[in-house]
Amino acid sequence: MGFILRRLGFYLVAFWASITLNFMLPRLMPGDPVTRMLSRSQQRLDPQQVESLQRLLGVEGGPWWQEYFAYIGRVFTGDFGVSISRFPTPVSEVIAAQLPWTLLLGAVSLFLAVVIGNLLGILAAWRRGGALDSVVPPLLVFIGSFPYFWLAMGSLYVFGVTLGISPLRHAFSVGITPSWDLTFIFDVAAHLILPALSIVLVSIGGWMLGMRNTMISTNAEDYILMAEAKGLRPRRIMFNYAARNALLPSVTNIGMSLGFIVGGALLTEVVFAYPGVGYQLLAAVQGLDYPLMQGLFLTITAAVLLANFLVDLVYVRLDPRVRVG
């Protein structure tokens, strides 16, 4: 419990810091969102109308400490203001419509990268010096050196434009009504393959190398030698003894890699016009939609911190040394 409370305190402090930075950044820039919105649209409003619009967007121009506490109060009630680019839709509704697609893309990509990468690392370390150990790691490291968006554009051109076997954009085909029937599910899966594949190819090499190195050191432990001396099957020793203990660092790496997965998902969404948080964030930046940008930044930060905290809870359960310590 002491370990969990310390980690919870750390994440609460990190969340408070992200809220503070999120509050300060737009206010440190010259002007305000209302002035930019009016200058772009070339509209003329009365001072009372401008004041009402500033109050609606949360930039009244009062003392900063009053705005700061008011902003914190709105954040904890889920009130991020009104989107400028999609006026008068609230920011919370815009994020709620886009966040599930980003979670789907990030969850599928992370799951495939972790499972396939760790499995390849286990097999490569168990058969050290074989073909799998000699060829696959350098190849995956070479592929992982490319940026997310480069692989996304390459796969889109090859499989979507040239071969025509993959959809080019969006999360589902135009004209299909979202529902839980098999037609819609298969259509979503078809649109998900290339974006998820771009993220998996970049990140799978790190998972394989991490598991391979941990497995090599685990194979030298005395309990592995004891299991071999008892005559246990190699498959049982590999998975039940060696891989089970070597997985602990990978659990920690899941939390650390969530930020990179989210960042890769944002860039990939822009390439494929995938209707997630990343695609919406680009539209918010292009439209100088500061309330929406603030809401998206804070949502991404909160999601990464929450996922890391859940990983810490799982790690406490898996590693008895943490509980004893």
Image (tube, rainbow, N blue to C red):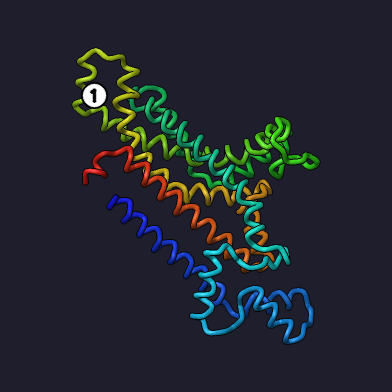
Q: Which secondary structure, mark 1?
A: helix
Write down the quadrant of residue 179 in the picture. top right
> Which residue position holds label 1?
224
Q: Residue furthest bottom?
A: 47
Q: Residue at x 77, y 40 (%)?
A: 177
Q: Residue furthest right?
A: 175
Q: On the picture, is 71 further left or further right than 167?
A: left
Residue 238 in the image: above or below residue 291:
above
Q: On the picture, is 40 further left or further right than 291?
A: right
User: Residue 272: horizontal and vertical position, in percent?
Assistant: 67, 46
Instruction: Say few, some or many: other residues with alpha carbon within 10 Å of mark 1 (under 14 / 14 to 19 / 20 or more).
Output: some
User: Residue 193: horizontal and vertical position, in percent?
Assistant: 62, 36
Residue 202 in the image: above or below residue 136:
below
Write down the quadrant of residue 221 in the picture. top left
Q: On the picture, is 61 further left or further right than 158?
A: left
Specify the amino acid type for callout 1. Answer: Ile
Front-most of 170 and 72? Answer: 72
Write down the quadrant of residue 162 in the picture. top right
Q: Residue at x 69, y 68 (%)?
A: 84
Question: How many labels were placed on the picture?
Answer: 1
Q: Is residue 166 visible?
A: no
Q: On the picture, is 177 further left or further right than 114?
A: right
Q: Is residue 38 visible?
A: yes
Q: Residue at x 31, y 35 (%)?
A: 214
Front-most of 323 and 209? Answer: 323
Front-most of 222 and 147? Answer: 222
User: Residue 268: horizontal and vertical position, in percent?
Assistant: 60, 47
User: Residue 157: horizontal and vertical position, in percent?
Assistant: 68, 40
Q: Residue at x 29, y 25 (%)?
A: 241
Residue 145 in the image: above or below residue 215:
below
